[in-house]
Image (cartoon, rainbow, N blue to C red):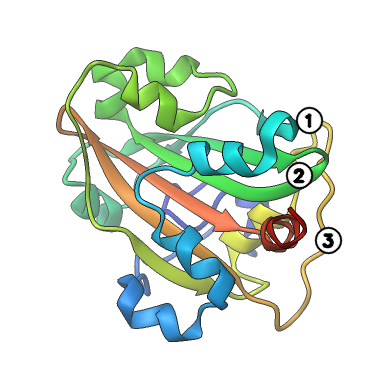
Amino acid sequence: MACDGQAVRSLRTAHGDVMPDSHWWPLERVAPQVPGALVSWLAEPGLLTARVRALCGDDLAFRLLGPLREAPLPVSLQARLDVTGPGCLLREIEFCCGARRVIFAQTILPAATVAGFPWLSNLGDAPLGEALREAGQPLDRDPLEYRALRHDHPLAIAAWQSSASSPPATAAAPVAGVELWARRAVYRLAGHPILVQEVFLPALLQIEAGA
């Protein structure tokens, strides 16, 4: 299994190969291609928990998609995160409004970060953003990066699919030619890096338009 910021599980990719850490851009580079209603979501500062809660109210649910999994951390991401250890933990969670999945989030926790903050491996389905803010440690964030995901991109496939070990949320099947937009950022908890990737599903704007 490759913890490369794109491949999620070995079953998600054709051969389980490590994909290069590339093709992520600043928002100003991609904004002309983004649906207008989605721009403010992509540009939302910090993690998305508070805004999704404001949209969904009591219908908001977080679901951890299976247990954390150990995975190798490719050299390209070791350099991106400024770590030297070869291992990480993968954490995946879905944000749901009622039964509709609106955001898929994948967190990459380098081994050195988990060693410094062991509680990160025991979050359960608690929102990561709130846990980081309550940690009582300095928290910084590198600039956000963005990209469009084709329907057959491993991160898009992971966002559409449900974990077999948890009740599935309602989500449409991926459609050829339909892109999903994703953003990512490196958070640094007392200097320890955490890579968070968030994929926005069509139900998000559908629910917002009907709110």
Say above or below: 49 vs 20: above
Q: Which SS class for mark 2?
A: loop
Outermost front residue: 211
* Residue, disc 2: 162
- Amino acid at dot 2: Ser
Badges 3 and 2: C-beta atoms under 8 Å apart?
Answer: no
CA gap between label 3 and label 2 equals 11 Å
Say above or below: 102 vs 163: below
**Is residue 138 something one can see in this rendering?**
yes
Q: Nearer the viewer, mark 3 or mark 2?
A: 3
Q: Which SS class for mark 3?
A: loop
Label 2 Cα crowd, 10 Å radius (few <14 / some 14-19 / many 20+): some
* Residue, disc 1: 166
**Residue 188 at x, y = what percent?**
22, 37
Mark sitting earlier along the chain (3/2): 2
**Residue 31 at x, y = what percent?**
42, 79
- Amino acid at dot 1: Ser
Mark sitting earlier along the chain (1/3): 1
Q: What residue is at 18 percent from the left and 40 percent from the top?
A: 84
Badges 1 and 2: C-beta atoms under 8 Å apart?
Answer: yes
Q: What residue is at 54 percent from the left and 22 percent from the top?
A: 126
Position of residue 169 in the picture relative to residue 132 (left or right)? right
- Residue sitting nearer the eye, 175 or 79: 175
Quarter occupied by residue 178: bottom right
Q: Nearer the viewer, mark 1 or mark 3?
A: 3
* Residue, disc 3: 172
